[in-house]
Image: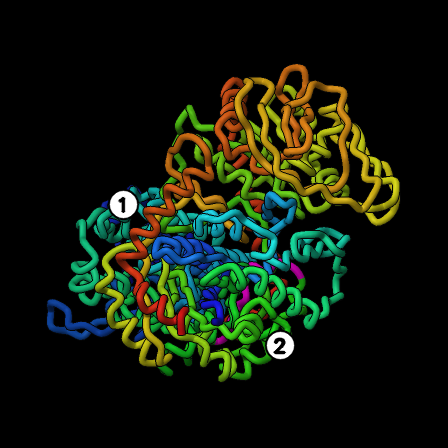
Amino acid sequence: MRTNRIMLQGISSGCGKSTLVALLCRHFRSLGLKVAPFKAQNLSLNSFVTSEGKEIGISQAFQAWAAGIEPEGAMNPILLKPGGEQGIQVVLEGRPVSNLRSGEELDRKMLLEVVSRSFDVLATRFDLIVIEGAGSPAELNLRGRDIANMRTAEMLDSPVVLVGDIDRGGVFAGIYGTHQLLAEKERARIKGYIINRFRGDGSILGPGISRLSELTGVPCLGVMPMVDLHLPSEDALTIDVSRIASADGDAREVWKQDLDALLAAGQKHLDLDMLRSIAFS
Amino acid sequence: MDLANKVREEVEKGVIGPDEQCEHYPCHFQGQDCSFCYCPLYPCLDPDLGKMVISRKGKEVWSCQDCYYVHRNDVAKDLMAALVLERQVPPDDPTVRKLKADLERAHAKRAQAIMVLGATSGAGKSLITAALCRILSDGGYRVAPFKSQNMSLNSCVTKGGDEIARIQELQARAARAEPIAAMNPILLKPKGNAVSQVIVNGRPYQDMDVQHYYGEFVLGKGLEVIRVAYDELARTNDFVVIEGAGSPAEINLGERDIANMRTAEIANADCILVVNMEWGGAFAYAYGTLKLLPEEHRRRFKGIVLNNMHGDAQCLRPGIEELERRLGIPVLGVVPHIDLTIPMEDSMTIASQCSDEERIRVGVVRLPRISNFTDFEALAIEPGVSIIYVTEPRQLELVEAIILPGTKNTIEDLAWLKEKGLFLAIKQRGGRIPIIGICGGFQMLGAKIIDATGVEGGTPQEVEGLGLLSSVTYFDAYDKRTVQVEGVLLATGERIRGYEIHMGRTESAEKPLLRVSDGKKEYEEGARSADGMVMGTYLHGAFDLPPFRRLLVEKARASPRSLDTELVYQDEVEESLQKLARTVEKAIDLSSVISERKEGV
């Protein structure tokens, strides 16, 4: 039987998809499923070293802990670390392999093979893989070159849910624009959208959600409230001090406690049954 | 004739500016020029400036009691100069007509409105608005910023005692204009639970919840307040640069969003959409925003600005072309990311300008190739600790501790430190405030870096480090160490945990900072100076557990507080505004939004 899968793609980076992947990992784990996170390609200077000495994006480590498992190299097969004149350091399957100089490109076919191989490493051992995209899938200037989003979704034949951050404003436009700028067959993979990081009274969003679902033809799978988290941020160079309340002790433990608050919010505000049936379709 | 004598007297006195002693002041607007209490152009019969009314005697007379024109200080100055040159004061009718035509060529009766809207909040509208204010002011125009409705906890008080958002004060500074209430007539200060204190025209008006505000206030009183405030600015300036709020395409708000397209309509503004490139998804946000607007609003958009671009804008070409083709609206330019010391507008960041004596500001040096900056998020768990990113030497005046973070390239970033003057500035603070180097930052703290094979720098070289530690780092092979470790912080004996990701190895004569084990062997790691003020380690995640961050805070609290931070700050702001204006001017084509109005400017 094929391993179940679901992919979250963001309408921008920093929209909270890493956190929602962690939430879904936690949720499915609480249902008794064996679940693992997966992100094909990370462009980040924030990395973590697994117990086997493999280097992966730090978010995948946190997501693995959310899933109740140890982080491993296969969870993030491609890690690109932008450097100086040495170019971008390429970490494949947890090990540095080369430096990419400006203008040089990696062989996409080879990369997709690496992605596929790592995914299979996980797929044989888990019931469900929660996949995370990278940045936005609708970067017009990267058309045909971005492998981290729709190329991965297609190769792994995964359904996709879009995530938009409402705290920044413009979330309806962002989701609508992303949906519209995708190619027809990519658009067909989108099974719904989640509005993330909402503050305030959800009733005022009603008219906007109805209109957006009408325009895109896909349902809203929930409006997640803003939850104060102590998660490390993956890409953005922002340290939101207000996010971090006074706390004592181990930052990793602080984060795990937050995760339970996050899951409780998810159970209340997300259509987790629908997300499960999308993953199990 | 009485009027003729009055004008003669006025011309003899010259420009007097605002007459605050006058019992009628301000009879037109705050800050008005009172040189021409009697207008030499009376009766101008210009329907833009006045109207015919029936006098008490039942006669038709020309009324200009609503005219601001001759009370603008720039208009008054030019008119006075022209009158002094005239041999005949007051002038005859043909001369009056000529004087007025000359004035109008130089000073528009009503300002041209340019509105800057964002696809999201934080798109950079505030700063693009500030940049336009400065660019236009540099062009010799009289300019005012305007934001009809602002939600912010960061406010300040004008000379007139009115409260406006701090960012409008900054934009006024960019426009070289005195901040006034009309620049931000509605200010919402969130109080929690969806209730805000509503400030109208600079004074507290009422506390309202979301339903009350959008349900009752905005479409009645709200729009009226905006109209009156905008009108004041429009009649006293050549340009009003308007900032929108959030996104104009919040389809759940529709016409109740008075801060964006409703304001654009009131001002009949040409609009620019600003999108932040840093987060990704900019094309989709731009496309979605403009497509969700009704045609009558979309028509106002003269262009799109892609803001805050890191790296080479050339790679955006194919995307820009497709976006322009699909929208029929041009991309006016790509503005690069700029490092500025300017207070940012963000409704959601709680005002953190507290003057808490206990507060510790930790300066993280913002190396161009900074890596693993998540290391410092844990630091902010400590109460009172805030983190600022440092790119200029004088910013070090503001901090009580310095961290040199990890970098993807130690040698190149060390060169950058020297270029920026940070190298010396950090060195000078050795022993005075705690300085901590992590990974690449640790390597920089040492005396020397020897790259014998060119692994790090491309060519073999030996580079001088900060010398705050005596250590020497060797890059002798393309070999990367990636390992998890656990151990103790030797200064306190407490547990510490982290991981190493680095190339190169470092030898120090100083005492080690840690004793750790990677599961295979136990070893001493890092270094610390004799006074304990300089510490270096390869460990990432070292601040995750409390001991190391507490040690840092303790050392920082014991070091002397910095002085004169406000002065340093003011200079920084002015310099930042100049830098901002020059960068934006270079990056975007403003010809479609700024029509030339003055000759010879």
Q: Is residue A228 visible?
A: yes
Q: Position of residue A96 (x, y in %)?
A: 72, 52
> A231 left or right of A58?
left
Q: Is residue A134 visible?
A: no
B556 and B48: which one is in front? B556
Residue at 24% x, 53% y is B200
Asked whether disc 1 touches disc 2, contact meaning CB atoms under 8 Å apart, the reply is: no
Residue type pointed to by label 2: Gly
Which residue is the site of mark 2? A144
State the residue lying farthest toward the top: B530
- Give the main secondary structure, helix, strand or loop, of the magenta stretch: strand
**Callout 1: residue from which chain?**
B
Residue B440 lies in quadrant:
top right
Disc number placed over residue B22 in the picture, else none: 1
Say if the magenta span includes residue B575: no
Residue at 65% x, 33% y is B518
Q: Which part of the image, by quadrant, shows the N terminus of chain B?
A: bottom left
Q: Where B255 sits versus A39, above or below?
A: below
> B369 left or right of B13?
right
Stretch of the chain drawn in magenta:
B302-311
Say if the magenta span includes residue B308: yes
> B46 left or right of B394?
left
